[in-house]
Image (tube, rainbow, N blue to C red):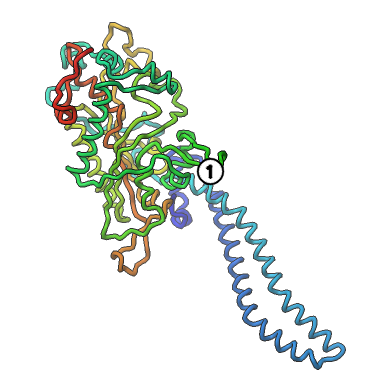
Amino acid sequence: MIDLKALRNDPERFKDGCRKKNSDVDIDLLLRLDTQRRDLMSRAETLRGEQKKLAKESGPKIGQLSGRLKSAQGDDRAALEAEISQLKAAPAKLKERIAALEVQLNEVTPQLESILLRVPLPPDPDVPVGASSDDNVELRRWAPEGWDWEKSFEQNRGFKPKTHIELCADLGLADFPRGVKLAGSRSYILTGMGMRLHQAVLRYALDFMVDRNGFTPMSVPVLVREEAMVGTGFFPGGRDQAYHIEETSRGGGADMFLTGTGEVGLMGLHQNEILDEGDLPLRYVTVSTCFRREAGAAGKDTAGLYRIHQFDKVEQVVICRADEQESRDWHQKMLGYVEDFVQSLGLPYRLLQCCTGDLGAKNADMIDIECWMPGRSALRADAPDDSPTAPNTPPAGEFGETHSASRLYDYQCRRLNMRTRPGGAGGKGETVFCHSLNNTVAASPRILIPILEIFQNKDGSVSVPEVLRPYLGGLDRIPPK
């Protein structure tokens, strides 16, 4: 959620942010509702002040008038009775006026909050302006020694590559037909060494962040209440991507939602808390099963392990002080951790600066890592017509997103009401909202695609990256069935 005071002071910044993020939020309507609400609140508060003053003054006055009434006659008595009646009726009239204002407030506030929740965080000025992912900017590439970006896989390795689907079939790593039979499209079953390799990657990624980079491992729920999804910024805009468990229709207290990332649970841990500044930054990592409906992705990446409904992910989250430079520094550190991780696996990749149109509502900046997948162009249903998909033509290969590092400033923490008090627990300053960042460490089985395709051998086997071998009992090669 954005700072409403900041929006009042500089509405053009937020209008510009909406344009750059392709958002149709009506900022002018939001400002009108905000003005209306503040006016109603001010009028109600003034009447409550009058109510208190009247309550303090009317009692003694009624007592005085009642004393005079005992000896009053004729017109004087009638006048005193009328005045006493008027004094007694005044609080009820004020109460009615306040109640009427509260009715109007109860109509305006939900409209205001509904729009406010949809206002995107303006992108940082140094983020390139663009309409979609097509306008993202490549920052740099990395490849292990011996890999030449100017050459195809076949030229680099001396044989035509197989897709990960072919490798999974030849090596007995996955069963797609039975996965679809059990759970429908975009489903799979990892089998044998496929499951072991999947677990090895997840365990290595967790150990990498805990043992080498000092993150605290956490176990968090993947079934959460709606406020956790709203608080982390995944609702209202992403409701169509989440699986909804309608508990209220079955007598439960609240509906639940399956999360699409461990970020939701990690950020929700400190909702409505004031954190000790001395404990910041908090550095958390989790392994969680993730669920995404992939609504709107019909026809895209329908085959294989790239775009699926259920997967496992190691996610890192940092909660730091409300300082822009500190947030920027952490963004680079978190990217560095993941670059080290991907390089340790020996996977060629590129760093991609996301443009304004590809940031999403909650990010001030986002940088993706895309690993090279030699077989990807042959599997994409939305690939260009000239993609080499013929059986005897080796795929040209494509980059595929495997990691995404986001800088959110106070957007999530404001929605979650997560604050810190400068100066520590004994500090006397006003509390401020913390800043947050997140980044994928490893999402599997998607990360298995470049591992299998990059490390495949001419004889049909797949070499195991050296860093994963300790998690596979020292196994260095997965042979064909």
Q: Name the spot of residue 402 as percent of width and height, x first.
A: 29, 31
Foreground residue among 101 and 17? 101
Q: Nearer the viewer, residue 308 or 196?
A: 196
Residue 73 vs residue 122, the one in the foreground: 73
Res. 396 in view: no
Residue 258 is drawn in which quadrant? top left
- Would you name the residue on which mark 1 appears? 252
Does residue 299 appear left or right of residue 203 in this picture?
Answer: right
Question: Which residue lies most toward the top here?
Answer: 392
Q: Position of residue 452 (x, y in %)?
A: 23, 21
Residue at 46% across / 57% down in the picture?
A: 5
Q: Residue furthest left?
A: 145
Relative to 25, is 220 on the left or the right?
left
The number of numbered badges drawn on the structure is 1
Q: Is residue 191 above or below residue 255?
A: above
The C terminus lies in quadrant: top left
* Label 1, residues with CA under 10 Å away: few <14, some 14-19, many ≥20: few
Numbered disc 1: secondary structure:
loop
Question: In the image, what residue occupies the spot 52% across and 40% down?
Answer: 247
Specify the amino acid type for callout 1.
Gly
* Residue located farthest toward the right when viewing the structure as drawn: 74
Determine if residue 89 is in view: yes
Say above or below: 29 vs 373. below
64 in relation to 230, above or below: below
Question: In the image as oriented, which residue stretches furthest toward the front?
Answer: 251
- The percent coordinates of residue 197 (x first, y second) are 24, 26
Residue at figure coordinates x 27%, y 22% from the top left:
194
Q: Of 262 and 422, which appears nearest the observer? A: 262
Q: Is residue 47 left or right of residue 332?
A: right
Q: Quadrant of residue 58?
A: bottom right
